[in-house]
Amino acid sequence: MNGLVILFVALYALALAVRLGLYALNVRSLKRHGDTVPEEFTGIVDAGMLGKMRDYTLATGRLGIFERIATDLFLIAIVLSGLLPWLTGAIESLGTGFVLSGIVFFFSLSLLTGLLELPFDLYATFVVERRFNFSTISLRTWTIDLVKTLLVSGVVLGVFLAVFFGLISSAPRWWWLLAWGFFVSFQLLVSWLYPVVIAPLFNKFEPIDDAGLMARITSLAEGAGIHVKGIYTMDAGKRSRHSNAYFTGIGRSKRIVLFDTLLAGHTHDEILAVLAHELGHWKLGHVRKQIVLSVTISLVLFYGAYLAVTNEAFYTAFGFSGITVYAGLFLLTVFFKPVGYLLSPLGAMISRLFERQADDYAHARLGSSYALVSALKGLATQNLSNLHPDPVYAWFTYSHPPLVQRIRRLRRLDLKAS
């Protein structure tokens, strides 16, 4: 067996072993501590609620493991079975040219992957989420969302691939640099368009009709030196009872979005505290830093991709008779999927640092952590969050500090300030 193939299988095996090991640690933590209500949640979470939180964590975690195994086995199968060289040959026999051949190749594999993921999405939405009284979506709305997603994704992916492969075809030696510039520009364009063009295709966004809350949010944002185009509520409850709020867009498309479920289940002070935390990310430059980091890493990856897909040995290892760049790019995405997972703790650590800094900002901005702590407790119960994650599991996978640790830290901030 070729060394590259051995490395490919070994990476997937290692990633799966790590994933299963982390899942086992999290299950063990829940079995050991899942019946104990943390002191911070005394009077808020009872035994029945805690059991529901535990069961939801186990159910979603188990489904996630099954889906990951199925997806990994599928990717390994299509790479090792000889399907990719056959598909490449079949497409090129049509004489469609490099650009269109690459688009058809990627669309075909995206369709296969989507079909594999479809039953998992159905089960998650209509079995797991409904069992825990989260899912409110009808089959009709789910189907309409699916069709819209396919259409939007098809258009976005089609435009991206057409330009991307056009650059490869027109500038064989420098396409990696040109494509990188296009990739960065395209991401920024989509980020600008998403809140004003794409998101409204799926949800209804309306200005908040609570004048008092609107005035307080506007004052909070302007006090942070951030001008947003609008403050909207989203009809999230039409699909799920989960609750959240977020900032979206760049430039003039920046806006604040509150789930209708958040407005219904939280006080004005709690909502302002959640938004103060999100404002902290903008004020402290976290979004800008993440963009710079992403742009830098992507430049290295694009150059590395150029070196790999112009090396004939890379293709022969996986059954190709010659260089086919678009197939090589797909191979690279599959090859480095487990690498990305194994390196994900680095991104998670940076994200948790940013979250702690945003908490600090919210505390300083509001003068107290009381409302934010209250909001976090409410969101935890509303979303059935895991109150007893295994420390290693949380370190590897969590983009936010575990809830109990986060609340304890916020309380320490109040003690220092008093």
Image (tube, helix red, strand yellow):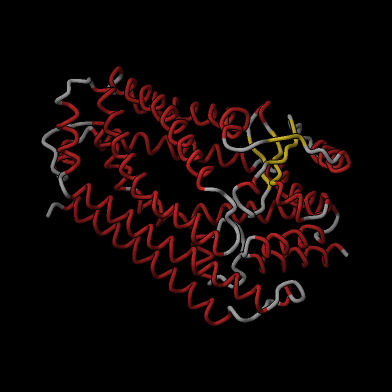
The structure residue drawn at horizontal position 19% and vertical position 52%, both measured from the top left corner, is 5
Q: Which quadrant does the N terminus fall into? A: bottom left
Q: Residue furthest top?
A: 170
Q: Report x, y in % for residue 314.
A: 19, 41
Q: Report x, y in % for residue 294.
A: 50, 39
57 relative to 269 in the view: left or right: left
Q: Report x, y in % for residue 397.
A: 50, 60
Q: Which quadrant does the C terminus fall into? A: bottom right
Identify the image quadrant of residue 178. Answer: top left
Q: Looking at the picture, does residue 38 appear above or below residue 272?
A: below
93 relative to 164 in the view: left or right: left
Q: Report x, y in % for residue 278.
A: 70, 46
The structure residue drawn at horizontal position 16% and vertical position 31%, both measured from the top left corner, is 90
364 relative to 133 in the view: left or right: right
The structure residue drawn at horizontal position 53% and vertical position 67%, both measured from the top left corner, is 57
321 relative to 59 in the view: left or right: left
Front-most of residues 282 and 210:
210
Identify the image quadrant of residue 221. Answer: top right
Identify the image quadrant of residue 39. Answer: bottom right
Numbered-mark total: 0
Front-most of residues 281 and 52:
52
The structure residue drawn at horizontal position 39% and vertical position 53%, both measured from the top left corner, is 119
Front-most of residues 180 and 59:
59
